[in-house]
């Protein structure tokens, strides 16, 4: 479990895995986030992730969306809320979002998250 004190998240159609790598964390999201209320599972997960990143004084988290086929607007809302928490934290960490340019929703939605906090969030297409 490491310094984050966080288990991977596995739901019906999505799996989120976390790997600590020195002062960085790699997170991979695979599957679909299309349930009616993804916040029921994602909000506590992102809150615990954020708390662990701050407490562990991690410098960066790399979030790989390349194998996430779909995320509904409620799921994107949970991402936005997580990013907003970083801005108000005593210890700020960088969030690097990697997405597939071949998946339409990723190319239209994820780059916009950079605009929320350009000093915290960066995006890269592959």
Image: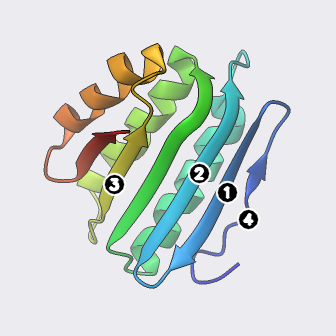
Q: Secondary structure at mark 4?
A: loop
Query: Which of label 1 and label 4 is nearer to you?
Result: 1
| Chain-order first, disc 4 or disc 3 | 4
Q: In front here: 101 or 120?
A: 101
Residue topped by disc 2 = 28
Q: Are marks 3 and 2 in contact (CB under 8 Å)?
A: no
| Mark earlier in primary sequence (2, 4) | 4
* Label at residue 7: 4
Residue at the (62%, 63%) spot, across then down: 18
According to the image, label 1 marks what residue? 17
Q: Is residue 83 left or right of residue 22?
A: left
Dot 3 crowding, Cα within 10 Å, few <14, some 14–19, many 20+: many
Q: SS for tag 2?
A: strand
Q: Which mark is residue 95?
A: 3
Q: Which of pointers 3 and 2 lies earlier in the amino acid sequence?
A: 2
Distance between the Cα atoms at labels 2 and 1? 5 Å
């Amino acid at each position: 479990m490491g310094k984050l004190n966080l288990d991977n998240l596995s739901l019906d159609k999505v799996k989120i895995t976390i790997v600590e790598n020195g002062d960085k964390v790699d997170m991979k999201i695979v599957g679909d986030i299309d349930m009616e209320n993804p916040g029921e599972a994602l909000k506590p997960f992102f809150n615990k992730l954020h708390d662990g990143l701050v407490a562990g004084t991690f410098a960066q988290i790399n979030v790989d969306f390349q194998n996430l086929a779909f995320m509904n607007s409620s799921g994107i809302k949970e991402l936005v809320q997580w990013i907003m928490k970083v801005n108000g934290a005593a210890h700020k960490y960088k969030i690097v979002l990697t997405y597939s340019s071949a998946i339409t929703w990723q190319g239209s939605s994820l780059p916009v998250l950079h605009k929320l906090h350009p000093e915290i969030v960066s995006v890269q297409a592959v």
